[in-house]
Image (cartoon, rainbow, N blue to C red):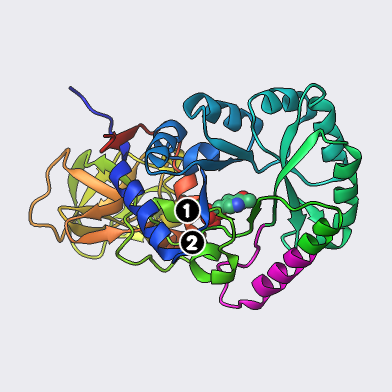
Amino acid sequence: MIGPSVWIEVDLASLARNVRAFRRGLRHAGSAIMAIIKDDAYGLGMPAVARRLWREGVRAYGVASAQEALALRGVLPRATILVLGCVHPSALPGLVRARVRLTLSSPEDVRQAARAARHGRAIAHLKIDTGMGRLGVWHEDCDALFAAVRAAAGRIEVEGIYTHLSHADAADERPTTVQLWRYRRALARAACWGLKPKLLHAANSAGSLRFAALRLDVVRPGLVLHGIDPMGRGLSREYRPVATWKTRVASIKSVGPGRTLSYGGTHRVRRATRIAALPVGYSHGYRVAWSNKASVLIGGRRCPVVGRVTMDQILVDVGHLKAVRRWQEVVLLGRQGRERIGAEELARWAGTIPYEVQCGLSARIPRIYKNIR
Ligand SMILES: Cc1ncc(COP(=O)(O)O)c(C=O)c1O
């Protein structure tokens, strides 16, 4: 059988291991995990990731949109699902019927949710903006949100109040401390309106790992469950990367000194060598920024990417390898033998963040699930 020329292996046993490592890291805080599996579980495929997390005892999930929430409801009928993003009013009745939790960020959001819940109750998490500047009511203005909930006369059940951190991964801890303080003040205001929800949450991966004070009723990890460090340094050995991105050597040829390689001739060959072409390029998510910077793994050794990355091919120097064969397996991201290329390292090479590396893997690359059982 002819397999794909580019593929991503998703090791669900590593995902399970990471959940356990993350739980240990919470150190008796008792926080429940709300796994953030938006954007197709950070590009690895929501259904398989969600099912495995459920088996590991994760009961709550955060997604970006109404469409993602309904798809997840089809996969996990009993899960607690929170939509983190804004929802168009036309999608609200369907979400209320599916018992999907809504993020409400403004009095207008509250009124629309109450209207959609005409024949029942919308379950909501109120969002307070304590410094992110994205969704949520500004912390100073939170009374208006709480007043709107009261005016909704029982059509809104407030299950949670949450905020989102803007600097959880930054060396300077002060912005996070200020956000926590603003959040607590908003909670005190909520209590004055009689709102004492059972689920308080604030921490993403970095917030949960770094700040014990942020391990509240719920924590919302995303990237760390994939075995990737949001701070970009590399996690402890308790964690394992979930995704391995692979391709095969498509061709090999000898190249003499003085020749230039790929568009623009950005790499000039100094000494006679062998150059392998790999059938992957920026259309798969292999970024142009990695040209002449990144390495790949062949036979457990690093091989530098030479010349500009093209739409569906890259060139790597394999002159230092004793044996290299056509169709030999190549690791672009992940481990091979003793060597590893992490999303953190690829991010550094491109001047970006590891999130963008993983989420940038094209949806057309087949995901192959390992250790499903
Ligand atoms: C509101 C919210 N909470 C939690 C997360 C998870 O973040 P991370 O992947 O850094 O853990 C995200 C992701 O962007 C988010 O938007």
Marks 1 and 2, how far apart in space? 7 Å
Residue 85 image label? none
For image coordinates 37% across by 38% down, the residue present is 55
Q: Is residue 289 visible?
A: yes
Q: Amino acid at mark 1?
A: Leu
Label 1–label 2 contact, CB within 8 A: yes
For the C terminus, the quadrant is top left
> Residue 53 location, x and y as percent?
41, 41
Give the magenta-colored segment's residue range.
164-185
**Residue at the image position 87 percent from the left and 39 percent from the top:** 108
Placement of 260 over or under 110, stated as above or below? below
Q: Nearer the viewer, residue 120 or 74?
A: 120
Q: Is mark 2 within 8 Å of ligand 1?
A: yes
Q: Is residue 176 in the magenta section?
A: yes
- Compare residues 277 and 64 and report the one nearer the observer: 64
Q: Quadrant of residue 363?
A: top left
Q: Secondary structure at mark 2?
A: loop
Give amino acid for label 2. Answer: Pro
Residue denoted by label 2? 230
Q: Is residue 122 left or right of residue 327?
A: right
As drawn, the label of residue 223 is 1
x, y percent for residue 145: 86, 49
- SS at circle 1: helix
Mark 1 near ligand 1 (CB under 8 Å)?
A: yes
